[in-house]
Image: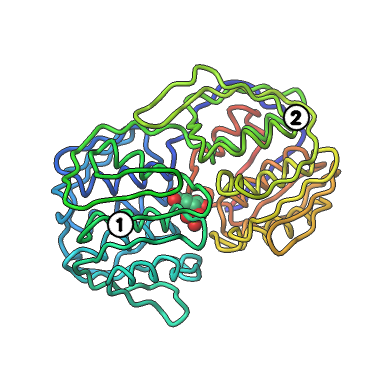
């Protein structure tokens, strides 16, 4: 599928983005290993969460999915049955890494695979610490999937993560619940803490003290009702659209503003963006707010250090904001971006250059000299949902038409993106062509 965006646009109105992808994955997994009924409301409708749901069904979990809710009947930490076939995690790194942690401690054999992108992503970061817990996992020679897991009793350990990764942290927490003692995990920099918040809600024996998490086994989890906040990583496209498209003003209701995810708000504000949080409240353990964004001139900033994990998925769209900011924006310490669905540093630099941006690639980030006069071009999504949507937003401030090829990948995280673009910018702002 190819999409075409016609500038100029002005964004106006009120929207709700669909449920947070990271929280939806975790609600499915935690519901599956809890005892009793879990009801998830407002879940992500993206293909990534569908991958988790399908794998869990193959593992024997009773899950009913409706438009507005998912009902899970979990039968405890050891309630899986050995699947008759390979588990396909699709494009989803979260599905593969979290499941690897859970399945390492189950008395069964499982094989996990994924699409071309997922089979090229590094899995040693999760295999190696799990092996240190006695897990039996095989990968291809380069630490890539398919992964084959012979589950067995696990040994507790104390581990310091070499890279800041919420997926690895979460895999080890799940494995820790199945181990023979208390496991502790230390993070180099704080990453999204949705697993910890949710497990506490479900009754796990988890403790947090500074940058150390400890998890003890032997405690049954109890099914819960989980209401999923709007995904700030999806809202990010509309926050930046409203910040840069002249005359814009939008409200994004019910958006998750967990501090471990809300780096984008802090950075955009430091660039001069006009973003107001209204009616901050809690949905379960997760803070949410309505965000009101008005277009406002931006200035370049330096983005590095501890904020990076708090906005890692938003860096492609931040690059777009930087093209409209006055001065230089310098992103550093973001080498992890090279290991996402595609090499996101290379992809966003290449594609924005095609549109006339003054952006250069660095080993661990990029530098943008703004403001840039962008022009329409034919761009590639690199089969990466966040690259496709970032380029679509760039198209709203470019001269002429911007075309994005292979844009069907948007459905990985945000199938409502195109309808919502039409809602806030008008029917003609974005078109789908075959
Ligand atoms: C995620 C963690 C991050 C993020 C990804 C989702 C999660 O990845 O980029 O989109 O749900 O835990 P890493 O753990 O690799 O940093």
Secondary-structure class at tag 1: strand
Residue pictured at 46% horizontal, 70% vertical: 119
Residue pictured at 21% horizontal, 71% vertical: 109
Quickly name the residue at label 2.
272
Q: Is the residue 418 above or below the residue 136 in the image?
A: above
Instruction: Using a 10 Å C-alpha cutoff, classify the residue at mark 1 as few (fewer than 14 neighbours), some (14 to 19) or many (20 or more).
Output: many
Q: Is the residue 129 above or below the residue 33 in the image?
A: below
Q: Nearer the viewer, residue 167 or 75?
A: 167
Left or right: 329 with respect to 100?
right
Left or right: 359 with respect to 416?
right
Q: Is the residue 431 above or below the residue 344 in the image?
A: above
x, y percentage for residue 292? 61, 21
Quickly name the residue at label 1.
183
Q: Nearer the observer, disc 1 or disc 2?
A: 1
Q: Nearer the viewer, residue 382 or 215?
A: 215
Per the model, the C-alpha gap separating discs 1 and 2 is 43 Å
Secondary-structure class at tag 2: loop
Q: Which mark is residue 51?
A: none
x, y percentage for residue 367? 78, 53
* Number of marks drawn: 2
Instruction: Using a 10 Å C-alpha cutoff, classify the residue at mark 2 as few (fewer than 14 neighbours), some (14 to 19) or many (20 or more).
Output: some
Q: Nearer the viewer, residue 332 or 352?
A: 332
Q: Earlier in the sequence, mark 1 or mark 2?
A: 1
| Rendering quarter of residue 382 | bottom right
């Amino acid at each position: 599928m190819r999409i075409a965006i016609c500038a100029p646009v002005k964004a106006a109105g009120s929207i709700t983005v669909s449920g947070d992808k990271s929280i939806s994955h975790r609600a499915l997994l935690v519901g599956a290993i809890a005892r009793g009924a879990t009801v998830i409301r407002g879940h992500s409708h993206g293909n990534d969460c569908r991958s988790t749901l399908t794998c869990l069904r193959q593992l024997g979990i009773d899950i009913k999915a409706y438009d507005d809710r998912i009902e899970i009947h979990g039968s405890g930490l050891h309630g899986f049955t050995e699947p008759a076939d390979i588990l396909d995690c699709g494009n989803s790194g979260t599905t593969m890494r979290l499941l690897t942690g859970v399945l390492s401690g189950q008395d069964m054999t499982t094989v996990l695979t994924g699409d071309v992108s997922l089979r090229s992503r590094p899995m040693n970061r999760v295999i190696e610490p799990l092996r240190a817990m006695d897990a039996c996992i095989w990968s291809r020679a380069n630490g890539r999937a398919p992964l084959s897991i012979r589950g067995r009793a696990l040994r507790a350990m104390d581990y310091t993560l070499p890279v800041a990764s919420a997926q690895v942290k979460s895999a080890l927490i799940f494995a820790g619940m199945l181990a023979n003692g208390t496991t502790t995990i230390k993070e180099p920099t704080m990453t999204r803490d949705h697993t910890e918040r949710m497990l506490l809600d479900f009754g796990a024996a988890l403790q947090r003290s500074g940058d150390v998490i400890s998890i003890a086994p032997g405690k049954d989890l109890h099914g819960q009702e989980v209401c999923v906040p709007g995904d700030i990583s999806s809202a990010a496209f509309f926050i930046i659209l409203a910040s840069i498209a002249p005359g814009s003003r939008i409200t994004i209701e019910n958006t998750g503003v967990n501090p471990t995810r809300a780096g984008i708000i802090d950075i955009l504000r430091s660039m001069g963006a006009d973003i107001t949080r209204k009616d901050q409240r809690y949905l379960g353990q997760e803070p949410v707010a309505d965000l009101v964004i008005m277009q406002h001139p931006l200035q370049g900033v330096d983005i590095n250090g501890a904020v990076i994990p708090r906005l890692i998925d938003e860096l492609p769209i931040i690059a777009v904001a930087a093209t409209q900011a006055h001065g230089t924006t310098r992103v550093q310490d973001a080498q992890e971006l090279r290991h996402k669905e595609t090499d996101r540093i290379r992809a966003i630099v290449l594609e924005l250059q095609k549109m006339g941006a003054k952006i250069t690639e660095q080993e661990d980030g990029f530098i943008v000299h703004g403001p840039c006069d962008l022009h329409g071009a034919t761009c590639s999504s690199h089969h990466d949902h966040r690259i496709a949507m970032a380029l679509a937003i760039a198209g709203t401030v470019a001269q002429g038409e911007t075309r994005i090829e292979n844009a069907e990948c948007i459905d990985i995280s945000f199938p409502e993106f195109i309808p919502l673009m039409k809602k806030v910018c008008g029917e003609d702002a974005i078109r789908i062509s075959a």
